[in-house]
Structures are given as structure tokens and as C-alpha cells.
Image (cartoon, rainbow, N blue to C red):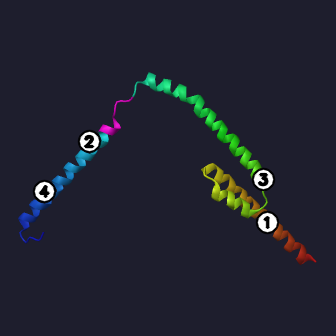
Amino acid sequence: EATLDLAERRRIRSAIRELQRQELERDEEMLASKRFRPERSSHRQDQDDKENWPQSRRLEEEQQAALAALSEQLEAITSVEELTKLLRAAGEYEERKLIRSAIRKLRAEEIEAAALAGNVQSSQ
């Protein structure tokens, strides 16, 4: 822990550096073995892709349809409080994104209406 001998300190530092170097080498070997694992045969992988493509395509289309329906529903809502409740209940990122956009749009309309009302009052 505490030594006054400079030669001993050098040996300790060199031993520590060696241990660190060995640890780095082990880590690099582990990463290399993970990085260069033999891949599945390309034929099997192509087959898996072909089998899963229609399913993923169908899920994507369903999600798009659900988002379009949500967008129409959001246009009918005129209360920021209702939109905020929907936002808190939403689970998907895309849903929350649409709801936040609707809230921003509604607030902008409210600000514009207030500004117009202020202009009308000031002109009278």
C-alpha cells in the first residue's frame, strides 16, 4: 500500500500495467468471438425473411390504419385536457407523437383566437 522504495513501486506499476493489458486482450478476444460468430446459412436466412415478410408487412399496415383512425379521432377533439388524458394513456411512440402534435395545433389555434379577440377589443 505504501512503500518508499522506488524500485518496488516500478515493479508494482509494471505488474498493474501487465494485468490491465491482459484484461484488455481478454475483452478484445471476447468481442471478436461475438463479432465473428458463424452466421446461419444464407439460404436459411433468406427463407426466414421470406416467411416473415408478409407478417411484418401486415403488422405495419395494421399500425398505419390504427394511426390514421387515431388521427381522425384527434381532429374531432377540441379540449386540451382530453388530449392530455389520451396522451397519458397512449402506449406507442407514434400514438404519443400524433397526440402531442394535436395538442400543439389546438394550443396554437387557441392563441390565435385570443390574439384576434384582443385585436377586435382594442379596435373598438
Say the numbered circle drawn on residue 69. Answer: none
Residue indicated by mark 4: 15
User: Circles 4 and 3: CB distance less than 8 Å?
Assistant: no
- Count neighbours of disc 4 (C-alpha within 10 A) and say few if under 14, some if 14 to 19, many if 20 or more: few
Upstream in sequence: badge 1 or badge 2: 2
Amino acid of disc 2: Glu
Q: CA distance from mark 4 to mark 1?
A: 70 Å
Point out the stretch of residues depicted in magenta: 33-39
Mark 4 or mark 2: name the one nearer the start of the chain. 4
Residue 83 image offset from top left, x and y in percent: 71, 59
**Alpha carbons under labels 2 and 3: distance apart:** 56 Å
Secondary-structure class at tag 3: helix
Q: Which residue is denoted by mark 2 in the rendering?
A: 29
Residue 4 magenta: no
Quarter of the picture holding the C terminus:
bottom right
Q: CA distance from mark 3 to mark 1?
A: 15 Å
Quarter containing the N terminus = bottom left
- The answer to which of 101 and 58 lies nearer the viewer is 58
Which residue is rendered at x = 14% and y = 61% of the image? 13
Alpha-carbon span between mark 4 and mark 2: 21 Å
